Amino acid sequence: MFRRVLALIVITLLVPLLVGCWDVQEVNRRGIANAVFFGLGNPKKVKMGIALVVPGTQVPPNVGTLQQFEKRNFVLSGEGDSIVEAWAQIQSNVERDIFFGQIRAIVLSDKFARENINDLLDFIGRIPLVPPKTKVLITKTDPVKLFDMKNNANDPIGNYVDFFAQSPFKRSFAIPVDLWKVNSIIDKKAGDIYIPMIEQSQNNYKIAGTAVFSRNRMVGELSMDETQTLATIRGTDVGYQTFPMGENNYKAFKNVRSKTDITTKVSSEGILTFDVKSKIQGILVENVPHREILLKEKKEIEKQGEMLIKRKIENLLAKLQGLDSDPVGFGDKVRIEYPGQWKNIDWYKVYPGAKFNVETKFTIKETGLFR
């Protein structure tokens, strides 16, 4: 009996010491960041800002109810000679401790992205609890105005970005990029990062193309059409495509899927050649007025589609070579196929002289016509 009592006393005394988490803080002492931006102020100051959600507004109101809050987030920003100084200014203007565990988006201004972003990635890596799957974006819009905007859906910017990236039918318009992937690609040094671009449009957020990098700096932009082509090369499981088939004649396709096989070979002169073979399929949407698609016409549409996609891929690859940017990951193919030679080459000297042989195969899986 004595032993049982003694054991109970010991357990009671040890329980407070067995708590596994020491980072305990009252919720009302935390400021929950929804998104964070980095830009350049004047003159050449580093600007940083965070979108803090208004407590109780994370979940949108139910249908038929009114939103209680004018805005669901507010923005705090700071400037300094470095990111650390800008962050210190933000921290000094808020009484709460900023919590980054629920952050959904990291946005860089295009001017900031054209600088060396290694210091930025190092700084983000030191912020506790930033989720590795946080989406990264580039903007040409003033980040403060972008973050502070009350959009039509009254969504905080982080929520909008997260929902957009989860929508399967938008993967060909914007190729989502997570923070962990940005770090991984830069660390491997066998390819370059590509980041969706966001801007303000019609009182809402809008994905407006893709920023491409060379090493650790942004060097150019891809239009929405070029972004779709990049998605086609990298492989997409769903999307839309519209093909011009003559004057005032267009054919639209949904559920577009693609798979690309890339092989590489080295000539005796040391010239790299890549064979890029893309297989694409899609469903032809309903024709207006309704009419049957004949087999001969179907074959002709497929042939024109193949020619159009081939030309788009060739033009995009030429543009990327001119920018010295490799978002497709051709360097990674060489690293895997020729590990011995890879150690002795400077990829950014070899890449501009590489040759590409592009082949495309386009198949209409369904006509989309109602019977």
Image (cartoon, grey):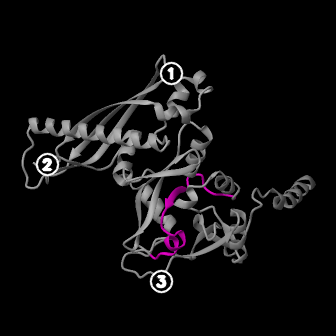
Quadrant occupied by the N terminus: bottom right
Between 168 and 63, the residue placed more toward the observer is 168
User: Residue 208 got which mark?
Assistant: none
Name the residue rendered at 44%, 65% in the picture: 199
Left or right, 272 with respect to 251, comes to right
Left or right, 363 with respect to 92, comes to left
User: Residue 369 got which mark?
Assistant: 2
Crowding near the residue tagged with mark 2, few <14, some 14–19, many ≥20 C-alpha atoms within 10 Å: some
Name the residue rendered at 47%, 75% in the picture: 149
* Residues tagged 2 and 3 counted as in contact (Cβ below 8 A): no
Callout 1: SS: loop
Any part of residue 177 in sight: no
Amino acid identity at mark 1: Gly
87 over 118 or under it: above or below: below
- What percent of the width, then of the height, locates residue 281? 27, 39
Outermost residue, top side: 268
Q: Where is mark 3, residue-wise?
A: 68
Along the polypeptide, which appears first: circle 1 or circle 3? 3
Q: Which residues are magenta?
A: 128-150
Name the residue rendered at 43%, 74% in the picture: 151
- What percent of the width, then of the height, locates residue 354? 45, 30
User: Residue 270 got which mark?
Assistant: 1
Using the numbered discs, state the Cα–Cα distance from disc 1 to disc 3 in whole angstroms.
66 Å
Using the numbered discs, state the Cα–Cα distance from disc 1 to disc 2 in whole angstroms.
51 Å
Any part of residue 78 in sight: yes
Callout 2: SS: loop
